[in-house]
Image: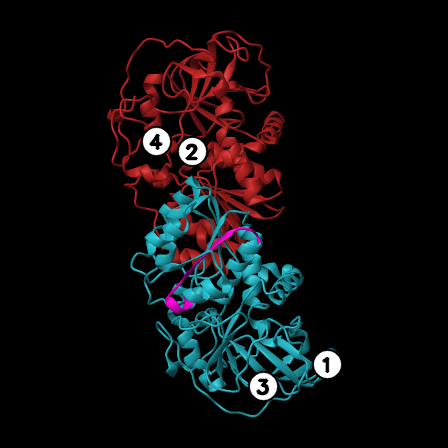
Chain colours: A cyan, B red
Amino acid sequence: MLAGRPDGPPRLEDFALEEGPIPEPGAGEVLMRTLWLSLDPYLRGRMGSSASHSSSTAPVPLGGVMEGGTVSQVVSSNDGGLASGDLVVSAAGWQEYAVAPAASLRRIDARGLPASTALGVLGMPGLTAYAGLHVIGRPAAGETVVVAAATGTVGSLVGQLARIAGARAVGIAGGQRKSAWLRECAIFDAVVDHRSPDFVERLADATPDGIDVYFENVGGHVWQAVWPRLNRHARVPVCGIASAYNASVADVSGDVAGLMSGLVTRSITLQGFVFRDHEQLRPQFEADVGRWVNEGRIAYHEDVVEGLANAPAAFLGMLAGEHVGKRLVRVAHEATARPRRASRGSRSQPPSGHHSGSSRGRPA
Amino acid sequence: MLAGRPDGPPRLEDFALEEGPIPEPGAGEVLMRTLWLSLDPYLRGRMGSSASHSSSTAPVPLGGVMEGGTVSQVVSSNDGGLASGDLVVSAAGWQEYAVAPAASLRRIDARGLPASTALGVLGMPGLTAYAGLHVIGRPAAGETVVVAAATGTVGSLVGQLARIAGARAVGIAGGQRKSAWLRECAIFDAVVDHRSPDFVERLADATPDGIDVYFENVGGHVWQAVWPRLNRHARVPVCGIASAYNASVADVSGDVAGLMSGLVTRSITLQGFVFRDHEQLRPQFEADVGRWVNEGRIAYHEDVVEGLANAPAAFLGMLAGEHVGKRLVRVAHEATARPRRASRGSRSQPPSGHHSGSSRGRPA
């Protein structure tokens, strides 16, 4: 449950674990067990307080269940469209069991990949990357695409999709471990460490022809370094400003007048979006990305924390950038063994503990 | 000539009048006499110094001829494509005679309108309005389009094109005289005076359904008032930030992080552009706008100052916002009487003095 509204970075005491009876589904509803809980930066905004500007809707009430996307398994159903054992994507939040109208749920088609990918490379972050790059970024062959938070699910997919489109992919990440994964597994053309003291110079070296598409999802000093390198007619899909989620981090600044003047003199487009704007692309997105993962052309990485009780610490760690790839909490194992085709995209699943797996190697 | 680099608003002493021999055209060149000189805000950027950020190229050298678009008449030609007496659009600058390669000139097709319109409603400002509204703004019928500097050539055309597209046009202007022209001649749906002490409330009253397209060309407190009223999926063509041309005017501010967050939560697009990006639209633009002016569906206004010696004062006044419509300097009268069809768009041309005329009434 949400127990406090942080005035900056969230703390463990902002969360509380409570027990209660398992709810009963009403007419047209299903009872689900949560298998996988997705941890995402936008959840900071849902906690309210100083960062409330980053969320357009009311925050989670104090004492309410924290929100979050889940992969859940139907336990019992009062709706003809879903049956016990079915796997669905839900917004069940940070809890082991939840009831929801069947009409609000989407049955998973994981295309031979683990069900957890419906929260990552085949889910909301995947569609964010796919739509932002193809609808807004539109890289031409030979153009340079730069993405920050490049080891995140969105960022790593943006870079790999850019390469499939024939563009040059440059990833920005923080630290040796993340940079190594990008170079060796996701195979970006160049990787720049934003913690490096000569970050600005290294970014210039990595983008000798300037930047045509910058996938903006972090803000701060990364944005400041990218901005002067944007080419004429550059496109900047803006899908979230991670550093702004913690309002106490005052590293995002700059003057709007200078920004506006730059937009005009270089004919630059800044376009904010959320994946919901592009729901109509989902079938094509699932087909393309599912195929490319199965063909080994796209690597993804899951960073799994075991047990709902560990969700708060895992969330705080994610906001601090300690993860590589998609951070998930495994709340429960799937109840019934379903036939699952072995594939290149499968992830090893050790039985317990904090671990991580990747479809194509693991970080050093 | 440019005589000084202003450190804020330009002054009269930043300009000097000099005399010299009329140049001789070389092979493939023509000698032209300047008839009309266009005064535009971007010229402030071409003067250099503190506002140099608003121009992407090197400023005019000290002692050099000030730049500026002109309608010129060919005096003698060493090129088969142009003959003495032809009217062309040129970048001849602030001088009575100039030589240029014939290939750099565009012969005017004024479609029955006065040749001076090639610098205004049928020229660069017109194409800026047309392309920005139709390529970036794309207003649907019933949507609300807001434009600032609405009595300028760009702004007044944006509003009128929006109405032709079935949208609601709201103009922002400064002062009673300009507002009256918008209401009575250009026929906007609503006009808001940004100098009014309750400007923010009046803008809200004038945009009860929010703002779908904001044509950004002024920045400052107007932008601050518009920003919170932008609807989801709003489009913001950005074609120039007039208040930023004078760097000493520090009224454009705001934090980039808040801007970026707003772009995401409301899926807003900010797109900088210049008319050159949309040169391929020129034939359609000339056909549409020429027809609509002739049909009386589009009003335009010219604010004419007589004589090159008065150009510096006219330019300073324009930066201060004293004009309505397109500010032009008449440098010389057309040498040979050409057949000109009388049309609704014709402008009365008194022989001398500072005057103004309009195709549809004149300001109170």
| Residue B281 image-quadrant placement | top right
Given the image, on which type of amino acid does mark 2 rest?
Arg
- As drawn, the label of residue A79 is 1
Residue A107's mark? Answer: none
Q: Which residue in the protein does label 4 denote?
A: B46
Q: On the image, numbered disc 2 is attached to which residue?
A: B177
How far is the residue under mark 3 from the one under mark 4?
Answer: 67 Å
Q: Give the vertical position of A72 relative to A235 (above or below).
A: below
**Is residue B95 at all visible to an observer of this figure?**
yes
Nearest the camera: B353 or A26?
Answer: A26
* Camera-side residue of B153 and B237: B237
Crowd band around label 3 with a 10 angstrom C-alpha radius: few (<14), some (14–19), many (20+): few
Q: Is residue B101 magenta?
A: no
Calculate the distance from the C-alpha at mark 1 to the C-alpha at mark 4: 69 Å
For disc 3, the marked residue is A333
Where's residue A184, x and y in %? 47, 64
Q: Quadrant of the C terminus of chain A?
A: bottom left
Query: Which comes sooner in the sequence, label 1 or label 3?
Result: 1
Q: Give the CA separation, mark 2 to mark 1.
A: 66 Å
Q: Which of marks 4 and 2 precedes in the sequence?
A: 4
Q: Which residues are magenta?
A: A165-178
Q: Nearer the viewer, mark 2 or mark 4?
A: 4
In this view, the mark in front (3 or 2)? 3
Query: Callout 4 environment at 10 Å: few (<14), some (14 to 19), or many (20+)?
Result: many
Few, some or many residues within 10 Å of mark 1 (<14, 14–19, 20+): some
Instruction: Check if mark 2 and mark 1 are on a common chain.
Output: no
Mark 3 chain = A
Mark 4: which amino acid? Arg
Q: Amino acid at mark 3?
A: His
**Marks 1/4 same chain:** no
